Amino acid sequence: MQNSSKMRYIYTVPQQKLMIWPWDWLFGFIPIKDEALRKFIPKKNFYWTSSARNALYLILNYIKKSSNKQLTIAIPAFTCQVIKDSAKRAKYKVIYYDSGIVASVEDIQSVLENKPDIIILSYNFGYLPDEINKIVEMCKKYNIIIIEDCAQALGAKQKGKLAGSFGDYVIYSFGISKNIGFDGGLVASDEKLVLKNQKNMPFIKLLSSILQSIIGPLLLTKLFFPISNHIMKKKLEKIKKYPLKNYSLPIFIRNIICHLAKKYEKVLKKRQENYKIITGVDSEDACLYFPIVDNIKEIKQCAATKGIELENMKSFNFLPNDSQKKEFPKAARISENHLSFALFRSKKDIDKIKEVIGI
């Protein structure tokens, strides 16, 4: 093995090309309209909030108001932990459907016999399910409300149709590791909504977001990343303990997100180009991360010898009880056997990673 002190390390979990610069927070002081953001979000009405987690919690509470019974929500057995957290906090009965990275028509069909009131379509890693129109048709046939989880899929398309066009409601995230990385979340709907009152975001939380945007780019450099990555991993391991922070999103942060949205088309194009370099296939997906699900032990070992760090998605989990793994074999396998790397990076890095993963 080579001497690691002499290697040019490629840290593949964070975004390597900067989407946000240390001075972008200054645009919070400038009123910026949301036209650039609306290019990627097809619904008419926006409702800003502190996170995608809170966005889902708010929309579930809104749906529950019009019902006199406990509602059942179907969620993928493998996705981000916060989906389950929000459903539980809104006091829904949670059931699961099996799926891999994203759901198939057969995966969705299998859960329809349980007659859920709502189904979450999670676009993990930024990818839409194949034949999503068929999935929508099946759900509509049974009067099932569709919530699209676009936390990682801003700007993704299928046959030219934007993610967010297919369901009744959509949630987005603008967290630091997402498509537009700063803070906050959003509910989008063609329907006008009356959502639960939110508290004003504390000034200390706003200040923390600004400081992260200034310090974050430094922490992702090869000098500091080994330390910051260790801290991030510990933080993600405690994700189940995070309290729900029901805050509205200040105009200051909205201005920053709308400013960053002006850059996003170039970011999206770069990720899609890198996806094609690796696979040889064009993609309309958001391509936030590239998931690897085969030969991961060998690939990880090979990557380590070349100074490339590959990790699994720490915030994504097998959500049912461990005793249910036989009931959801696809989700169980993916949760234990996947690696991922961010696709927004230089071609030089992509070529080196492609060589290692052998695609």
Image (spheres, rainbow, N blue to C red):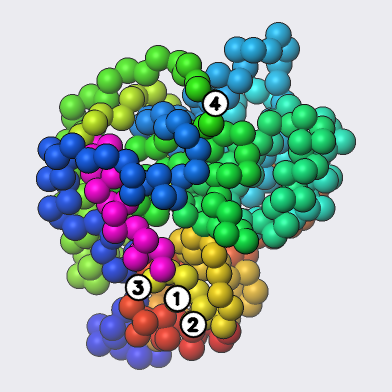
How packed mark 4 is, by other alpha carbons closer than 10 Å (few <14, some 14-19, many 20 or more), is few
Q: Earlier in the sequence, mark 2 or mark 3?
A: 2
Residue 294 percent location from the top left of the image: 65, 74
Q: Tell me which residue sits at (35%, 91%) in the image.
A: 2
Q: Is residue 328 above or below residue 125?
A: above
The amino acid on which the numbered mark 1 sits, given as a three-letter code, is Glu
Q: Secondary structure at mark 3?
A: loop
Residue, disc 4:
191
Residue, disc 1:
273
Residue, disc 2:
277
Q: Earlier in the sequence, mark 3 or mark 1?
A: 1
Q: Earlier in the sequence, mark 2 or mark 4?
A: 4
Q: Earlier in the sequence, mark 1 or mark 4?
A: 4
Label 3–label 1 contact, CB within 8 A: no
In the foreground, 40 or 2:
40
In this rendering, position of residue 51 left or right of residue 213: right
Q: Which quarter of the image is occupied by the C terminus?
A: bottom right
Q: Quadrant of residue 117?
A: top right
